[in-house]
Amino acid sequence: MPRAFTLIELLVSIAIISILVAILLPALGSARNAARMARELNAARQAMVAFIAYADDNRGGVLIGYASDEMLARGMKVFDDAGNPLSGPIARRYPWRLAPYMGYHLNALYLNSDAIADMRREGDLGQFADLAYLYSLFPILGMNTRFIGGDDDTGAFRTTSRRIFGRYWVERIDEPRDPSNLVVFASARASDDLAQSVVYHENVLGFHRVLAPRFTDAARTVWQDQYDPKSVNPILNSGSVHLRYDRKAVIGAFDGHAETLGWNDLRDMRRWSNTATRPDWHLSPR
């Protein structure tokens, strides 16, 4: 007759299994995080290949960060992956304008099929334009729109702005003085209220724009003094940059390479602006 476990032996076995699980879980979590980081680094490299291909196809002109309505009215054509024309904020944001140069492989911009599945479920609630809108809003990488390509939301393309500040954004592929240190894309996340406005938001993480630590105000930074990974408003805390990999963010640099950078490196304005001459540089009138 086979011998059964005693109560003590069973409890000891459960305790040993619990200890092993406690030891393995952090290691498994670290492995998953490393895998996600590797995928995002690859996404940043793909985005930069597309960014450079866009410039090659546009006589050296770089992708516009956030286009103006006037640009769309003057003939800028933007289409979704089914060939439908797009307009308004959907076309003004970068994802659908970069997508053709990525072969419309949306996984490269949204990192995983779960995020795309969530947005497709959301899109089922309305018209296809809603789905295109979500794609334009939540790419995993935000673009440094103020200083790369220009951002209409901050008046980059207006006559008054040009007269006061000049053209402070990179407009051509051959302009950067130090392309290996100039951020084009960075890990991003949307504010909690914006992300949670999406019904199926569990895997929706990114945001289309990241803001540099400083802009025109010498007295203050756009970013707060300390990074807060739980901030409900990452725009105010870190310009929407998300340090999701052991307090580091993935960046795609202007020369095409991808790497991870921490808080102190990312607070250096020379990483963001081609004309910055010191870490605390800010844009000032000519």
Image: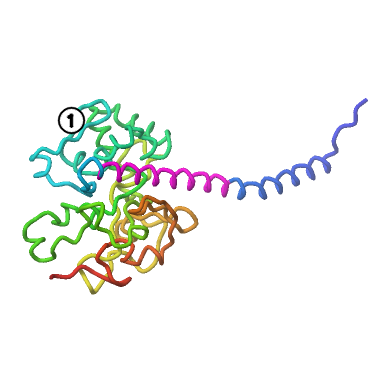
Q: Is 192 displayed left or right of 29 in the figure?
A: left
Give how far across and how far down residue 85 sits, in percent.
18, 30
Q: Is 257 displayed left or right of 31 in the figure?
A: left
Q: Is residue 23 magenta?
A: no
For label 1, the residue is 85
| Residue at 35 percent of width and 50 percent of height | 189
Give how far across and how far down residue 166 sits, in percent.
13, 63
Query: Between 5 and 202, which is closer to the camera in this rendering?
Result: 202
Tell me the amino acid under the disc marked 1.
Answer: Pro
Query: Between 172 and 281, which is closer to the camera in this rendering?
Result: 172
Q: Is 283 displayed left or right of 235 in the figure?
A: left
Magenta stretch? Answer: 29-55
Residue 230 appears in which quarter of the rendering? Answer: bottom left
| Residue at 23 percent of width and 73 percent of height | 218
Q: Quadrant of the N terminus?
A: top right
| Residue at 82 percent of width and 40 percent of height | 7
Compared with 107, 266 (above or below) is below
Name the main secondary structure of what is drawn in magenta.
Answer: helix
Give how far across and how far down residue 86 sits, in percent.
18, 33
| Residue at 24 percent of width and 66 percent of height | 275
Q: Quadrant of the C terminus?
A: bottom left
Compared with 85, 275 (above or below) is below
Residue 170 appears in which quarter of the rendering? Answer: bottom left
Compared with 180, 95 (above or below) is above
Q: Secondary structure at mark 1?
A: loop
